[in-house]
Amino acid sequence: MSRERPRRAALPPAQENIEKFEKVVNEGNFYGAQQMYKSISARYISAERYAEALDILQSGACIQLTHEQVTCGAELAVLFVEALVKGKYPCDDETIDRVRKIYKKFPQISVPHQLGDEEVDDDMQKLSEAISAAKTRFECCSSFLKAALKWSAQFGSHKSGAPEIHSMLAEYIFSESPEVDMAKVSFHFVRGNNPKKFASTLVNFMGKCYPGEDDLAIARAVLMYLALGNLRDANDLLDEIKKQVESKNLELPSSELMQFIQYLLQVLQRDALPLFNMLRANYKSSIDRDPSFNEFMDLIAEKFYGVQRRNPLQGIFGDIFKMMGAE
C-alpha cells in the first residue's frame, strides 16, 4: 500500500513572515533570521509568488543592513535581484526605487587616514581593521549593484544598464572604496544620469589627489562622455566643474591637457575632421600622458566623423569596458 506524500502547508501572506523574521533580527539572532529569509523566500519563488518573495527579501536586506550585518544584508539584496530576474520584472521607476532603498541602507563609514602620535601600534591595528571592514562593505554593495545593473540591462531600455544604478555604483565606489579608482568612478558616472553629481565628485577629488592627477581625472571624464557620443553631458560636466570651482574659491587645473579638452569640445560642434586631426597632433604629448586617451580619441573620431578604427574590438578602452562593466 503506497503512502501519500505529505502536502506542503499553504504559504501565509508575506507580511506575517516579515513581522516574525524582523522580531528574530531585533533579538540579535542574525544568522537564524538569515536562514529563515532565504528558505522561506525560496518557497514563495517556487510557488511563483514573486511579489511576496520580493517583499520578504527587501525587508530582510534592509533590516540586516540597518543592524550593520553587511554580509547577510548583501546576500539577501542579491537574492532580491535574482527574484526580479526569475519573475521577469521590467526595469521601471518603481523597481529602481526599491533597489535604491536597499542601496541606501548599506553603511557608509569613512576610513580614518590620520594616525595619532601616541599608541601608533594600536592606531595601525584599528586602521587595518577599518580598511578590512571597508573592503567587505564595498565588495558586498558592489556585488548587489552589479547584479542590479545586469537585471536592468536585460529587462530595461538601456543595454548597458539603468543610468540610475550606474550613478549609485559610481557614488559608492568614490565614497566607500578604500582605494579609489577614478577610472571606474568615471566609467559608471558617464553611463549614469547625474553630470552635476559627477562634477562635485571630481571637484572633491581635486582636493585629495596628488599633483598632476586633477587634470587627468577631468580630461578622462570628458573623453569618456565623448567616446559614447555624448557631447551635451561632456559640455555640461565641464561647465559645472568651472561653476563649482569658482563658488569654492578654488582654481581649475591649468595645463596643456585642459587646454586641449576645451578646444576639443569646440571642434566637435563642427564638421571639421582636419581640425580634429590637427588638434590631436598638436597636443600629442598631453594625450600620451594616459594610455587610454588615444583609444578614446579613436572612438571619438569614429562617433563624430565616421573614421573606422583598424581594430575596433581591441585596445585599452575595450579592456577597460570588460574590467569595469562585465565584472
Image (spheres, grey):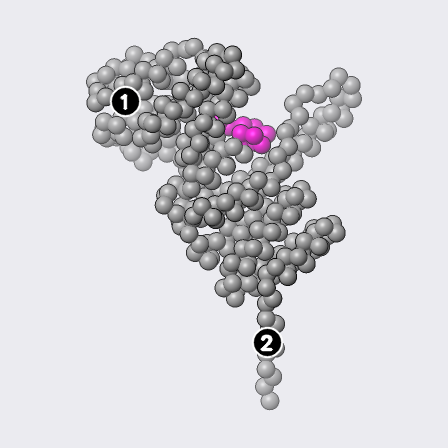
Three-letter amino acid code at disc 2? Arg
Residue 272 sits in quarter: top left
Give me the residue at 36% from left, 45% from top: 157
Q: Spot the residue most to the bottom.
A: 1
Q: Is residue 181 visible?
A: yes
Question: Where is residue 246 shown, x and y percent of the image?
Answer: 47, 14
Give me the residue at 61% from left, 72% from top: 9
Q: Is residue 39 visible?
A: no
Q: Nearer the viewer, residue 51 or 312?
A: 51
Number of residues whose C-alpha sits closer than 10 Å to that of mark 2, classed few (under 14), some (14–19) or many (20 or more): few
Residue placed under numbered mark 1 in the picture: 268
Q: Nearer the viewer, residue 33 or 216?
A: 33
Q: Nearer the viewer, residue 173 or 49?
A: 49
Magenta stretch holds residue 21: no
Three-letter amino acid code at disc 1? Leu
Give me the residue at 68% from left, 44% from top: 67
Q: Spot the residue most to the right.
A: 119
Q: Is residue 149 above or below residue 286?
A: below
Question: Where is residue 159 shown, x and y percent of the image?
Answer: 36, 43
Q: Earlier in the sequence, mark 1 or mark 2?
A: 2
Range shown magenta: 173-183
Q: Nearer the viewer, residue 240 or 303?
A: 240
Question: Where is residue 291 shown, x and y percent of the image?
Answer: 39, 23
Q: CA distance from mark 1 to mark 2?
A: 69 Å
Indicate the quadrant containing the N terminus: top left, top right, bottom left or bottom right: bottom right
Residue placed under numbered mark 2 in the picture: 7
